[in-house]
Amino acid sequence: MERPSQQRRAQHAAITHEAIIDAARRLFVERGYFATTVQDIAKLADLSPATVYAVAGGKQGMITELAKRWADSSVLGESLRALPTLNVPFEVVRYVAQASRAVREQHGDTMRILLATAPSHPQIAQELEASTGRYRGTIRKVAEHLDGLGVPGGARFIDDVLWFYFGYSGYFTLHDDNDWEYERAQEWLLDRCVEALGVERP
């Protein structure tokens, strides 16, 4: 059993780590990964640079943590657990639209950071590849489920269509670039996707 002093130290360490990651995320979005320094992050988190290095392992450690949080998003796991309970194709696609929106709202800034930084940073490119693989793997399982429900075109075609609408570009273009509200973007993407798949809307 932990002593109270140990519990306080653990809580303080967790709070410090979270402050660092939050500061890094904010600055990476505002300035870009390369233009942000550990000193900038330390200043925003109200910590010393030495503490930032000790707790988070420098910028590489911070962006790796952000990528891990996206890859381990509870939304992806929940989507896979819910999939067997959805037996109407339209309801499946609507669930994907909702889940992809939730992922984008929670981790869209991390996606942007990784996509912008990966071409010039091999390690971050690996992080992006791993996170994309997990995200696309979830989409692929949805495609296989829809194929089993009789949606035409085969699992590969369904996977491609789902990724086109609910991968990276759809919400980035409509919400980030065109200032659409997430609700409007979700409904538009859903309508276009079910049309492309030949899925009937109730």
Image (cartoon, helix red, strand yellow):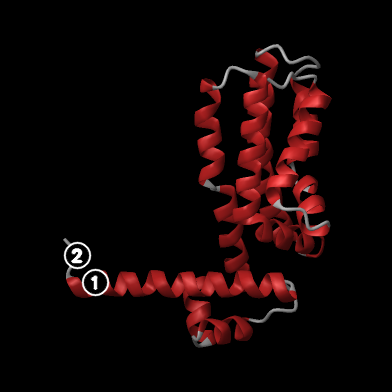
Residue 135 spot, x, y in % from top left? 65, 41
Name the element at disc 1: helix
Give the residue at mark 2.
2
User: Regarding mark 2 in the picture, which secondary structure is present there?
Assistant: loop
Q: Could you tell me if residue 57 is visible in this image?
A: no
Question: Quarter of the image containing the C terminus?
Answer: top right
Residue plotted at (75% across, 60% down) = 122
Q: Is residue 64 above or below residue 157?
A: below
Is there CB contact under 8 Å for labels 1 and 2?
yes
Disc 2 residue type (three-letter): Glu
Q: Residues within 10 Å of mark 2 (few under 14, many from 20)?
A: few
Q: Which amino acid does label 1 sit on?
A: Gln
Left or right: 47 as drawn, with respect to 39: left
Left or right? Give the position of 96 relative to 15: right
Name the residue located 67 percent from the left edge and 56 percent from the top edge.
108
**Which of the labelled discs sits on residue 6, or is there none?**
1
The relative height of residue 197 versus residue 75 in the rendered view (above or below) is: above
User: Quick one: quadrant of the N terminus?
Assistant: bottom left
From mark 1 to mark 2, how far is it between C-alphas? 6 Å
